[in-house]
């Protein structure tokens, strides 16, 4: 099995599950090495303030990853201007086999210029922001367009990870990983997307969308 | 809304998603404060070695949490002997409204003496270890017995978090949280439990169960 290097971008005020869901899947691929990377190495505080995830490497230390993964979260809004993160993403994307995102991580990919003409998705509350970045917004849980794989909000990163695991190592490996993490989801409600959720939940989150997407 | 304090136990070689899945749900409860706690405060390296989660507080700094959450992972095997973690768990359980676990975290609760006569679950590969700890093993995704709520392997913590969110704050809040994290799971395969997974996956993981559960 070839070596697979996976770089997960961290930044302050990311949403932890966006990064940890697909990491938990992809780190189980045979031959995979995961590196959490950030503009500067060190602990990054997630959106609630209660948890820090540590980036072991600075951007300059991680070149040519096989898989680039960009999580979303309120801190995304501070990463929409050109700068070191965009430069690193563009360079990493040039050599990557897969460039991926979860939730509003796709807005960062888009701002870096990597989604022009690409079918992509994001958190349902942010879907209307993709077109302005040159992407074609798609209301699906996981969207594969060439080597770009984007996932819907937060928890969708687990489904994205399994989709990608199957692309990289085949369906048998992906199924074995799924069983290893016992991913046999049984949500107690049918409320996980705006198409099935009760209208009070959709309306409430729409009214709070700035807070939900950007925190504060 | 009353204040809800949630203490998530961290330790070296835990499985990140066990902790982060329910944290992502429960931290969104109105009035909730989450504290990541460990025997000593500081970063704890998860099972793959690639990620550290930071515990902001030592055990002695967190008394009387409303919710105690114990994740699982290979590091569980080092927490089966009596010591400061068990003492803290027993004291926290005495005053808690809910005492909870994900995956092999229930084995730690059991070793601390908190599951005697309690219906409980764990990762499917570890289910046969619960009885020796005095628990009644149950092959369900989320098991509620009085104030003890245990979840099956790794990803089951998200379902546990939503079940608990509904118990604490009602189904409308839980549904709104579910929509906020867009938890509308679409696994690309039907392989998440031994009852539905292909036999090659079940057989492979059973043959590797020591490695899967304890790592190394």
Image (cartoon, coloured by chain):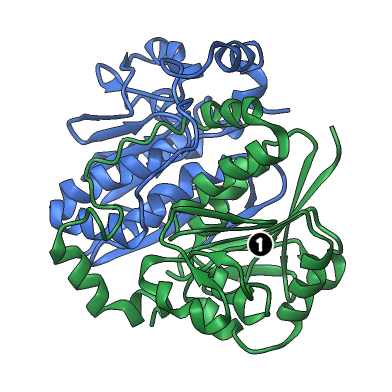
Chain colours: A blue, B green
Position of residue A83 measured from the top left corner of the image (x, y, whole percent): 51, 33
Position of residue B123 measured from the top left corner of the image (x, y, whole percent): 42, 66
What residue do we see at 56% from left, 69% from top? B106
Position of residue A132 measured from the top left corner of the image (x, y, whole percent): 41, 10
Position of residue B133 measured from the top left corner of the image (x, y, whole percent): 56, 81
Report which quarter residue A11 is drawn in. top right
**Quadrant of the rendering where the C terminus of chain A is positioned:** top right
Q: Is residue B12 above or below residue A93?
A: below
Residue at the disc numbered 1 = B54
What residue do we see at 30% from left, 53% from top? B192
Tally the marks: 1
Q: Chain of mark 1?
A: B
Judging from the image, what secondary structure is the residue with disc 1 in?
A: strand
Report which quarter residue B168 is drawn in. top right
**Quadrant of the rendering where the N terminus of chain A is positioned:** bottom left
From the viewer's perspective, tell me whether residue A171 is left or right of residue A98. Answer: left
Q: Nearer the viewer, residue B154 or A116?
A: B154
Q: Quick check: can you spot residue B147?
A: yes
What residue do we see at 57% from left, 57% from top? B19
From the viewer's perspective, tell me whether residue A140 is left or right of residue A41. Answer: left
Q: Is residue A171 above or below residue A191?
A: below
């Amino acid at each position: 099995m070839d070596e697979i290097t996976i770089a997960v971008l961290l930044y302050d005020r990311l949403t932890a599950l966006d990064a940890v869901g697909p990491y938990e899947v992809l780190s189980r691929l045979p031959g995979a090495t995961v590196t959490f990377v950030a503009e500067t190495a060190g602990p990054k505080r997630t959106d609630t303030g209660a948890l820090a995830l540590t980036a072991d490497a600075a951007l300059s230390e991680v070149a040519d990853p096989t898989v680039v993964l960009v999580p979303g979260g309120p801190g995304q809004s501070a990463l929409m201007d050109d700068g070191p993160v965009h430069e690193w993403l563009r360079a990493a994307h040039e050599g990557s086999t897969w460039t991926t995102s979860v939730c509003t991580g796709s807005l960062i990919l888009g701002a870096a210029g990597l989604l022009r003409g690409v079918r992509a998705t994001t958190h349902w509350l942010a879907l209307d922001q993709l077109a302005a970045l040159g992407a074609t917004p798609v209301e699906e849980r996981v969207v594969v367009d060439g080597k770009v794989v984007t996932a819907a909000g937060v928890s969708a990163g687990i489904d994205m990870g399994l989709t990608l695991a199957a692309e990289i190592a085949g369906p048998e490996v992906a199924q074995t990983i799924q069983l290893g993490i016992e991913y046999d989801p049984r949500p107690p409600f049918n409320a996980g997307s705006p198409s099935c959720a009760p209208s009070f939940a959709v309306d409430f989150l729409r009214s709070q969308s700035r807070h939900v997407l950007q925190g504060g």
